[in-house]
Image: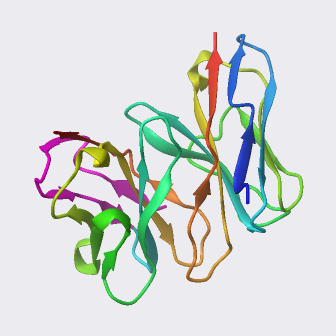
Amino acid sequence: NAGVTQTPKFQVLKTGQSMTLQCAQDMNHNSMYWYRQDPGMGLRLIYYSASEGTTDKGEVPNGYNVSRLNKREFSLRLESAAPSQTSVYFCASKDLDGTGNTIYFGEGSWLTVV
Amino acid sequence: AQSVSQHNHHVILSEAASLELGCNYSYGGTVNLFWYVQYPGQHLQLLLKYFSGDPLVKGIKGFEAEFIKSKFSFNLRKPSVQWSDTAEYFCAVRPGGYQKVTFGIGTKLQVIP
């Protein structure tokens, strides 16, 4: 059981370049999330998708777009990368409701924008 | 919108010392509460969670947390820490019926042998 898989693990971009971070989960979860983690800022929610076909902004959505391609996949796109987007990005998923409600995280994607 | 405050950003303890990490949230309704741990170089893993029922929740590795609704708090405790508990700890809240999960900024715990 792979859980939450994100790619790439490491990426260096030049300012202005675009890229997409891919995320897939094999747990049949309804909800998926993208967070960024920065020193002293903790985890901040960029976008989330409560269920297939829906997406919503989190705390820091500016400069990002997302696509919930199907139930398994939730991608994060940087259209024009900026140095301020240098961060570690985590994808996560969670079942819709019930007593489980545990968020499962991917291993992270280290992005550097120069 | 909900928010989470973690009061201690960096804690240093000697092995065998007791630990308490503070977490307060702001949301007036029903909530689910979580503590996650991130060991150096790894992704976040669930330590424990509160969904309903007994407000004293026991998690893995000897951790526990108490939900005090009147104080909007969910503090994490461990009676005796070990060097292997060195990690960053995150508190999180999810309002009941909603899927948005908000994390605190984390507390870095360093345990000295």
Residue A22 painted magenta: no
Q: Nearer the viewer, residue A34 or B57?
A: B57
Q: Is residue B8 above or below residue A40?
A: below
Q: Is residue A8 above or below residue A98?
A: above
Q: Is residue A24 left or right of residue B55?
A: right
The color scheme shown is rainbow
Q: Nearer the viewer, residue A43 or A56?
A: A43
Q: Is residue B110 above or below residue B97?
A: above
Is residue A69 in view from this perspective? yes
Q: Residue at x 33, y 88 (%)?
A: B54
| Residue B81 figure quarter | bottom left
Q: Residue at x 54, y 61 (%)?
A: B101
Residue A72 position, x and y percent, is 83, 58
Residue B14 painted magenta: yes
Q: Residue at x 74, y 31 (%)?
A: A8
Q: Is residue A82 left or right of residue B74?
A: right
From this viewpoint, which residue is outermost toward the right?
A69
Residue B107 position, x and y percent, is 30, 45
Q: Nearer the viewer, residue A26 or A91?
A: A26
Residue A41 position, x and y percent, is 42, 37
Q: Is residue B23 above or below residue B70?
A: above
Q: Is residue A11 left or right of residue B6?
A: right
Residue B99 position, x and y percent, is 62, 67
The magenta-colored residue range is B1-26
Q: Is residue B102 left or right of residue A110?
A: left
Is residue B73 in view from this perspective? no
From this viewpoint, which residue is outermost toward the bottom?
B53
Q: Quadrant of the C terminus of chain A?
A: top right
Q: Quadrant of the N terminus of chain A?
A: bottom right
Q: Residue at x 80, y 22 (%)?
A: A18
Q: Nearer the viewer, residue B49 or B81?
A: B81
